[in-house]
Each structure stands twice: as structure tokens, then as C-alpha cells.
Amino acid sequence: MTHALEIDRVSLGYPQGGAVKTILHDFNLAVRSGELVSLLGASGVGKSSLLRVLAGLKQALSGQVRLFGEPFSRPHPRVGLVFQSAALLPWLNVRDNVAFGLDFKRQPLLGEAERNRRVNDALEEVGLAHAAQKYPSELSGGMAQRAALARAVARQPQVLLLDEPFSALDAVIREQMQTMLREIVRRHNTAAVMVTHDIDEALLVSDRIVLVGAGGRKAGEWQPETPFPRHGRLHDLSRLRGEIMQSLYHAQQDTQQAATVEFVI
């Protein structure tokens, strides 16, 4: 079976004192179309860096990333990325910000009609058709993140990457965005990978949850069985939540111990 996205023995690191400090070691993950996988873990274990590798914005030390079996290491027109910050261009209105996501040198050239259709469909899908002419300074935080999501969706991505996209939003807007994300993954049969520090968010939206532990190794993996939608049903997931919480605590302890040993050495 060919997965939409395959991460094969990927290692990440950065220069430190004339050597290379490895933060992610031989990491493996395969994601199917229509599946949303959340990555949990302590700060500094390489989750966001891994997303940047998947987006083609950072090079791995070793290993390979494949899209439907084909290796790639540079930005790809069928891979969308949503950051924690909406990162909208302030001099463009919402419509033009969404269209900007289609101005990609490796994106197949689109005719005006197809370009307009994609932008219109994306704005409609995230509920921003009425705000197409507004500028970023006129948007609430939730509206700005919807625009960022629309910009990614307009590219019709086969893979959608999300780096804590809802962490700055209030609880009500966050729930709306989580529901919207699930619907986008379902409707477009997109493979999605989301980094989050919020266990409840991972439980609410994920088909699978992967814990990244010390040394950037996989420290646990869970597949919630409660059907979607799960909002209002967290009590059904309390046992799994406790298990993940305990594993996360141990992973954080291991990460802190590893950092202490490295400092002493």
C-alpha cells in the first residue's frame, strides 16, 4: 500500500560548537490519505523542525520524505502549510492573500477561471466569502487563521501540514476551527500532520496521535476509537487521555535528563 506521506528514518540537527547536535533520530511515520496525525511532545524535540522538512523548507541530516512514493526535499505544490501565525501579507486583501498561495514556481500554471474558482471555493469552505475584500488589519484572530487555512486549501494539497494552528485562539473559535479542519480532511481526502501541545485537541481531531520523545524518537502511538465528531465526548476518551498524559510526562523527564547529561558532559 502506497501512503500519501512517508517519513523514512529522518534525522534532524543543527551545528553546535563545531559539531552537529541531533534533535530527531531515525524518525519513521506513514500517513494515509484522509488521515490526520497529531504530533505531541516536549518543546525542543524537533516536531516543528520536522514539519519544515516535510514542507521542503529545511534539509534533513539523513533519511527520506516521500509523497505517494516519490522522494521530495523542496517545496511542493501539493503540500500545504499553516503556521501558528496566519502570516498574511498586510498589503493584500483576504482574496489576494488566498490567491497568493497559488503563485508558486512549481505550481502548474492555472488559467484565470481555474484560479478564481479555487480561491472562491476555498473562501466559501472556510466561511470567509463575505470578507474577501477585507485586509488583515480588519480581521479577528479566528478570521485570519481561516484565511491562512484557505490559502493552503486553494492549492488542493495532497498533504496538509499544521504547526499549532489554533493555539492562539479562544476556546469557542478553536473548536470551530478544529471542526472545520476535520471536514476539510474528510472532504478532500487529504493526509494531514498537525503539531500541537494540547492533548485534548489531539484527542478531538486526530485519527492517530504520535508522541515524540527524548532524542526525537517515537515514544508512543495511539488511535482513538471514539467516532467523530468528538466535541462534548472527551469523557469517553478520559482513559486514553490519562495514558497519553503519563507517557508525555515520562517523555519530558527523559528529555530533561538527556539535556542535563549533555550539559554536564
Image (tube, rainbow, N blue to C red):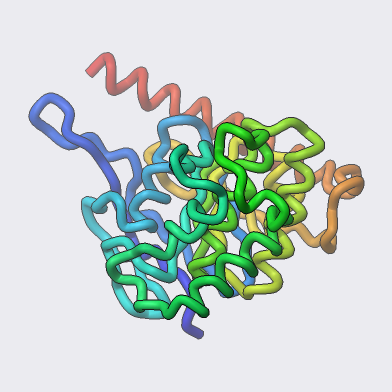
The image shows residue 265, relative to residue 117, as above or below, that is above
Front residue (pair 242, 149):
149
Tell me: 167 left or right of 13. right
- Between residues 179 and 12, which one lies in front from this camera angle? 179
Q: Residue at x 30, y 70 (%)?
A: 106
Q: Nearer the viewer, residue 193 or 41?
A: 193
Question: Which image quadrant for residue 134?
Answer: top right
The quadrant of the picture occupied by the C terminus is: top left
Can residue 106 be seen? yes
Residue 53 image offset from top left, x and y in percent? 34, 53
Q: Is residue 246 visible?
A: no
> Does 194 appear above or below 214?
below
Query: Which x, y percent locates residue 200?
Result: 74, 40
Q: Residue at x 58, y 70 (%)?
A: 190
Quarter holding residue 95: bottom right
63 left or right, relative to 1: left
Residue at the bottom extreme, as displayed: 1
**In the depicted structure, whether residue 147 falls above or below residue 248:** below
Residue at the outermost left position: 18
Identified at 76% across, 49% down, the residue is 204
Find residue 61 and report its horizontal and vertical position in percent: 22, 51
Return the x and y of residue 212 as percentages of the image width and height.
49, 44
Name which residue lies at 42% across and 23% down: 257
